[in-house]
Image: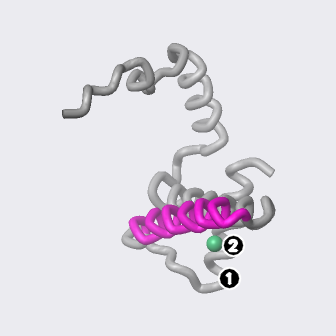
Amino acid sequence: MHLEEMKKEIENLVLTKGFYNKPEDIPKKLLFAFIELGEASDAWKKGQPQEKIAEELIDAIFYILDASRLACPTVNMDEMFQYKLNKNLGRPYQYGEGHRNQQEEPKK
Ligand SMILES: [Mg+2]
């Protein structure tokens, strides 16, 4: 299943279950995505089964795609994924992680 197909399935879920479905609900959906990431992190910290961690990560993806459905409805997320992947592949090695090569300041 591709991202655009997932968006349609999530829209169906949202409408069927009566979840938030207005543009003003976008911040809530993004906050819920963070909460699901926290649940994934907590599951990992507690040594829970991989399936539990994966389930929480999928919850986060649900909220992210749901937010995208309302926040940028004309953007094809499959095309955006490919665009962003190509963009990142074109960047230098360890881009954005220049801090790795910096020495720590001596403690006083
Ligand atoms: Mg969850």
Q: Which residue is mark 2?
A: 12
Using residue 11 as the reference point, say whether residue 30 is left or right of it: left
Quick check: is 40 in the magenta stretch? yes
Q: Vertical placement of 32 versus 84: above or below?
A: below
Q: Position of residue 90 (x, y in %)?
A: 56, 16
Q: Vertical placement of 90 versus 104: above or below?
A: above
Q: Is residue 74 visible?
A: yes
Q: Secondary structure at mark 2?
A: helix
Closer to the camera, 51 or 73? 51
Q: Residue at x 71, y 58 (%)?
A: 6
Q: CA distance from mark 1 to mark 2?
A: 6 Å
Residue type beneath disc 2: Asn
Q: Residue at x 52, y 54 (%)?
A: 73
**Magenta span: chief secondary structure:** helix
Q: Are marks 1 and 2 in contact (CB under 8 Å)?
A: yes
Using residue 16 as the reference point, say whether residue 66 is left or right of it: left
- Residue range highlighted in magenta: 26-47
Res 84 → quadrant: top right
Quick check: is 52 in the magenta stretch? no
Question: In which quadrant of this rendering is ligand 1 seen?
Answer: bottom right
Res 96 → quadrant: top left
* Most distant residue in the left direction: 108
Residue type beneath disc 1: Thr
Question: Which labelled disc corresponds to residue 16?
Answer: 1
Q: Position of residue 76 (x, y in %)?
A: 60, 44
- The type of colouring in the image is one colour
Quarter occupied by the C terminus: top left
Closer to the camera, 99 or 90? 99
Q: Is residue 59 visible?
A: no
